[in-house]
Image: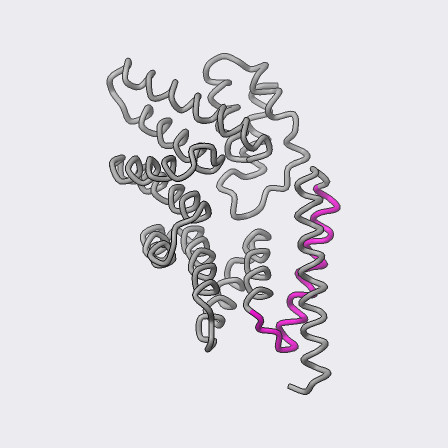
Amino acid sequence: MGFFDAAKAAYNGNRAYHLHVDANKLAGEGKVAQAKEKYQAALKLYDEAVRQGNTAPNIMQAYTLLLMREGEFERARELMEGMSRQKGLSDGDWFQLRIQYSICLWHAGQLDRAIETIGRAAAHKMNGSIYGTLGMYWVDKARQTGEFGPALEFNRQAMDYDDEDAATLDNMAQLHEVMAEAERDGEKAAAYRAQALKYYKKAHAQKPRQITTIYYLARMLHQNGDDAGARKLLEMRDTLYISAICPVTREMIDALAAEVA
């Protein structure tokens, strides 16, 4: 690749990244249509940059994350596998790559491989991203198996790390709701639900636009007979950018909104 080709690839990669950042800001402000437009423009430029030879880890990581958010998991997987064969990746590059690749595996239904993959990143260091993502995986594992011990243990560690993190609070809420659904003792089930509601409310207070919390808290309020509270939460649904990574879909939120209307 010649100097001018390399310069063009770097330029397009940087343009894509700045569009991506702008789109994230718009999404955070509830400007969904404008955010989607910029995301699509960023995807085109990322693709062009990669085809021109840009393999910079920061650009590849941003591109693959956006691909997954837009539902293009197979393309993201191919790029991440290609990135894993690059020489000279730093520990930080491997750390982020393993987290993102685990998301791809989780979305494909390969939960055990996702847990194993992110575990390699966790062996390098623990941070909020690891606690939130791996905590979610363990909740899914508990949901599938009915074995709650490992999920409780890990998410309690996450709470020790940061008991105000919205993702961790949401994970604890979902876990207690699942435990309530599995519990045959009525009093214990009610106690688990009360604890879940407490965690959901705290998560929502910390991060009011967190989609999973909005949905599950609204659903629990609806189940408890508080449709007014559920409607209030769901009022913002049209201002939410719901990515393909999110386990709560637009259809799920709209269906719940129709129930409580």
Q: Which residue, as the protein is rendered here, is positioned at the far bottom?
A: 2
Quarter of the image for residue 5 reads: bottom right
Q: Residue at x 55, y 48 (%)?
A: 244
Where residue 25 appears, x then y in whole percent? 69, 45
Q: Residue at x 36, y 32 (%)?
A: 175
Where residue 69 appears, x then y in whole percent? 57, 51
Quarter of the image for residue 179 reads: top left
Q: Is-magenta flag for residue 33?
A: yes
Where residue 3 appears, x then y in whole percent? 69, 85
Q: Is-magenta flag for residue 242?
A: no
Query: Between 178 and 166, which is closer to the camera in this rendering?
Result: 166
Query: Between 192 and 107, which is closer to the camera in this rendering?
Result: 192
Way the structure is coloured: one colour
Where residue 241 appears, x then y in whole percent? 63, 41
The total of numbered circles placed on residues is: 0
Q: Which residues are magenta?
A: 32-56
Instruction: Determine whether 125 is above or below 225 in the image.
Output: below
Q: In the picture provided, is 137 more to the left or to the right than 214?
A: left
Query: Between 203 and 138, which is closer to the camera in this rendering?
Result: 203
Q: In the picture provided, is 59 more to the left or to the right than 81?
A: right
Q: In the picture provided, is 261 more to the left or to the right than 37?
A: left
Q: In the picture provided, is 235 more to the left or to the right than 152?
A: right
Q: Residue at x 36, y 41 (%)?
A: 140
Q: Residue at x 47, y 36 (%)?
A: 165
Q: Give the position of the C terminus as an image quadrant.
A: top right
